[in-house]
Image (cartoon, coloured by chain):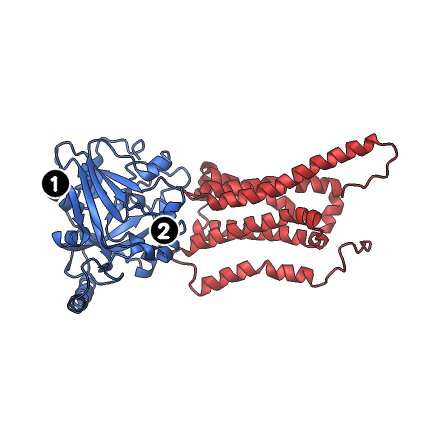
Chain colours: A blue, B red
Amino acid sequence: MIIKRPSDIPPSEITSEAVYRQRRRFLQGTAGLAAGLILGGCEAAESTAPAPGTPLPNVKPGPYGTDEERTPYDDVTSYNNFYEFGFDKEDPKQNAGSLKTRPWSIAVEGEVEQPGHIDIDDLLKMFPLEERVYRLRCVEAWSMVVPWVGFPLARLIQHVKPTSKARFVEFTTLYDPKQMPGQRVPALDWPYREGLRMDEATHPLALLVVGLYGKVLPNQNGAPLRLIVPWKYGFKSIKSIVRLRLIEQQPVTTWNQRAPTEYGFYANVNPKVDHPRWSQKRERRIGDFFKRDTLMFNGYAEQVASLYTGMDLKKNF
Amino acid sequence: MRPRSKVGGQPNRWLKPAVLIACLLPLAWLGWRAVSGGLGANPIEAIIRYNGDWALRMLLITLAVTPLRERLGWVWLIRVRRMLGLYAFFYATLHLLSYVVLDQFFAWGEILADILKRPYITIGMTCFALLIPLAVTSTNAMVRRLGGRRWKRLHRLVYLIGIGAVVHYYMLVKADVREPLLYGAILALLLGYRVVMGLWRERQRTASAGLTASPSGRGR
């Protein structure tokens, strides 16, 4: 049997030269700006949060990009499901200003050789930042194309040295009803928790994100650190992470706990498995009038299908 | 029609035009947001939700007419009840059309699958289907043709439609059920009032029937 190894970049997804040049110009421009900001901001205390929209320096284009049209910045930052800041899509943009993203540290716990806390500013210097243009498919049957900035989750996991018992990663969002007014409403079992199997978490597509469109991640998009798992429904991509726990047992995850028949632990994008309340066959790309067909694993089947060989994806939805 | 008594004061000739225009304001606001780009990143979803909200609100306003008239003596309200009911139908139609045209773009197979497989859509469609006979029989001619008693019995369907509409909304919400529950509470109040009044009138009737030749005040 010949096992075909998927290529890292399908030809259809190679960025056109025009777009690439545009991006180089953009990056050069923003690098200059960033330098200015750094030089001008020397007296600022280390723990002040970067202003939303501050350009991120030294971002290199990463693999797995798509050349599909990007969803405009204004749409990406004004149409958000982030219940911690309200239950309507426009609420997070209105309310997320109350989130303090500095000081911010991420606890690393459980089955690791180096448990502890990592400060967000140290984390930002630990791994080179890449831009990855991914499709984002929400379980509500809409989608976007977003140029995220971040680094592979695998890098951080390698860094903390998992023990042989680590089979799952559990992520937790900040819990602070003072900063997150949505948490005063018991609509979900706060804090928000998500999880991945170890092989999913260390897959090169899984990204820890600190920015979008070359700029610091806006609060409503999950600042200062969020997960992006592009082959899964958006709710897996947990926002404003304060804790990673490596564990032996499959973790309890928020939406799965809330409605187990509607939101599975895996939550892989799958046009053949409908949500009980709506079809998943098609999706509306934000900005489009006509719906388009939803792709298996959100179009990342070539990269991730092998993670699930032998699994019944109708049962493990 | 025979001239009616002036219990509710002089009939105001501006009442109906004013309500007619007031009930179009939500649509005007939607239109303004649509042309000024104020519908956000997913305008289709925004339009569907907005029209659904107003269909439910108009329905509840219509159902509030009788309690308000009886409790607060706002007799004039009865003159706009039909118009309010038709506006509920109007916004429900826009809600359905925006789903069929904007969301599904006439993908009848998908729509049929939705109706059969998604309980909240099944309920929503049923509510709309039940609204049609009420709208059709809303004219004076139809009231006469059916006769008051039968017309009234038919139009009691609106209670069922109200319950269905709230359930439809409740079922589509993912986590924060406060708003559908608020509508549900208002509906429960409006329907509960009718149940209580019905029981009370029943008691009055039996009580007055027990008295000999009493010129009892008829329950209005």
Earlier sequence position, callout 2 versus callout 1: 2
Label 2 Cα crowd, 10 Å radius (few <14 / some 14-19 / many 20+):
many
Q: B199 or A208, which is in the foreground?
A: B199
Q: B107 or A24, which is in the foreground?
A: A24
Where residue A109 appears, as percent x and y from the top left, is 18, 39
Where residue B205 appears, as percent x and y from the top left, is 78, 34
Name which residue lies at 41% across and 44% down.
A185
Judge whether residue B137 can be spotted in this image.
Answer: no
Disc on res. B185: none
Judge whether residue B35 can be spotted in this image.
Answer: yes
Chain for disc number 1: A
In three-dimensional space, the C-alpha distance between marks 2 and 1, rounded to whole angstroms, equals 33 Å
- Choose top left, top right, bottom left or bottom right for residue A217: bottom left
Secondary element at image label 2: helix
Disc on res. A114: 1
Q: Are marks 2 and 1 in contact (CB under 8 Å)?
A: no
List the single residue furthest toward the right.
B213
Where residue A127 appears, as percent x and y from the top left, is 13, 52
- Above or below — where is A103 with respect to A3? below
Specify whether A82 is left or right of B106.
left
Amino acid identity at mark 1: Gln
- Above or below — where is A275 with respect to B29? above
Name which residue lies at 46% across and 49% down.
B106
Name which residue lies at 24% across and 42% down.
A171
Q: Which residue is mark 2?
A: A85
Secondary element at image label 1: loop
Specify whether B45 is left or right of A226.
right
Chain for disc number 2: A
Name which residue lies at 81% across and 41% down.
B217
Label 1 Cα crowd, 10 Å radius (few <14 / some 14-19 / many 20+):
some
Amino acid identity at mark 2: Phe
